[in-house]
Amino acid sequence: MLKECILVVPCHNEAERLDADAYLQAAGDGGPRFLFVDDGSTDATAEVLVALQRRNPGRIEVLRLEKNQGKAEAVRRGMLLAIERGARLVGFWDADLATPLEALGPMVDILDADERVDIVLGSRVRLLGRAVERRWQRHVAGRLFATLASWTLSVPVYDTQCGAKLFRVNERTEATLAEPFHSRWVFDVEILARYARELGFSAADLGGRIVELPLERWHDVDGSKVRPQDFVTAATDLGWIAWAYRLRK
């Protein structure tokens, strides 16, 4: 189903970090389609994306948001448009390709193999034989955040914040995307909470519906827009999600 997959790539001032050749190679025969969402960029991102689309207009599309809406809304708007375009699988991927696009194939395979699974999460697990390279400060902060996210969801999820996720298109996914997210920073967690609560699943049910895939490769890319103070905002948002969605055990 790789050809029937559309990956949404949110972009805000990514002109210097976009690897056009990597996207073009992945979008070749048998590859996914890409929907780039320019989230009100003020650099040359729009021009870079238009040039990229011209090189493969059948597999690459650009959605331009005039004003910056934040990653959460850029992803949501892009995924809804991808569903309108007829995608059977829809996902989102960080523009800097910290997660290589080669990880998409195994994610598709999981959805192909088990119809119960609706969501596959890329997971940055540091294992022997895997090239997962994170700066130690970000690794420690990530593990702390993951613990809080796991508590919020009442599910032992290892990594909610990896920027590589894939969804089966169905009424459950569409309902999850129907309304804007409250959180701009931890909307990944809110997606999972909304998927569980609004569709009547208990926390225990998520284990059969959502799968984490340990990545073979992942690396930190310079130019991250996340600031230390954003972790405070993220923690506050987690508290709101825990209260607002109140998942059943």
Image: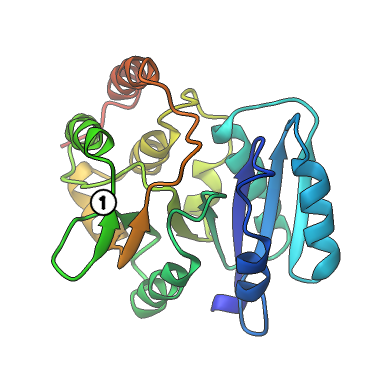
Q: How is the image coloured?
A: rainbow
Q: Residue at x 21, y 47 (%)?
A: 158
- Residue at x 18%, y 71% (from the top left corner): 129
- Left of 217 or right of it: where is 204? left
Q: Secondary structure at mark 1?
A: helix
Residue 190 image offset from top left, x and y in percent: 40, 33
Above or below residue 52? Residue 64 is: above
Q: Tell me if mark 1 has few (under 14), some (14-19) or many (20+) residues whose alpha carbon lies within 10 angstroms of its own.
A: many
Give the camera-side residue of 133 and 202. 133
Quadrant for the N terminus in the image: bottom right
**Vertical position of residue 12 compared to residue 50: above or below:** above
- Residue receiving disc 1: 206
Q: Nearer the viewer, residue 62 or 208?
A: 62
Q: Nearer the viewer, residue 137 or 30?
A: 137
Give the number of marks. Answer: 1
Q: Is residue 1 left or right of residue 186?
A: right
Q: Residue at x 58, y 42 (%)?
A: 75
Q: Position of residue 223 (x, y in %)?
A: 51, 37
- Whether residue 87 is visible here, answered yes or no, is no
Compared across the picture, whether 172 is left or right of 143 comes to right
Horizontal side of 80 relative to 43 (left or right) equals left
Residue 241: which quarter of the image?
Answer: top left
* Residue at x 54%, y 34% (from the top left corner): 72
Q: Amino acid at mark 1?
A: Leu
Q: Is residue 183 in sight in this rendering?
A: yes
- Reply above or below: 139 against 57: above
Residue 211: image location, x then y, percent: 29, 60
Closer to the camera, 126 or 120? 126
Indicate the position of residue 19 as horizontal and vertical percent values.
Answer: 62, 58
Q: Quadrant of the C terminus?
A: top left
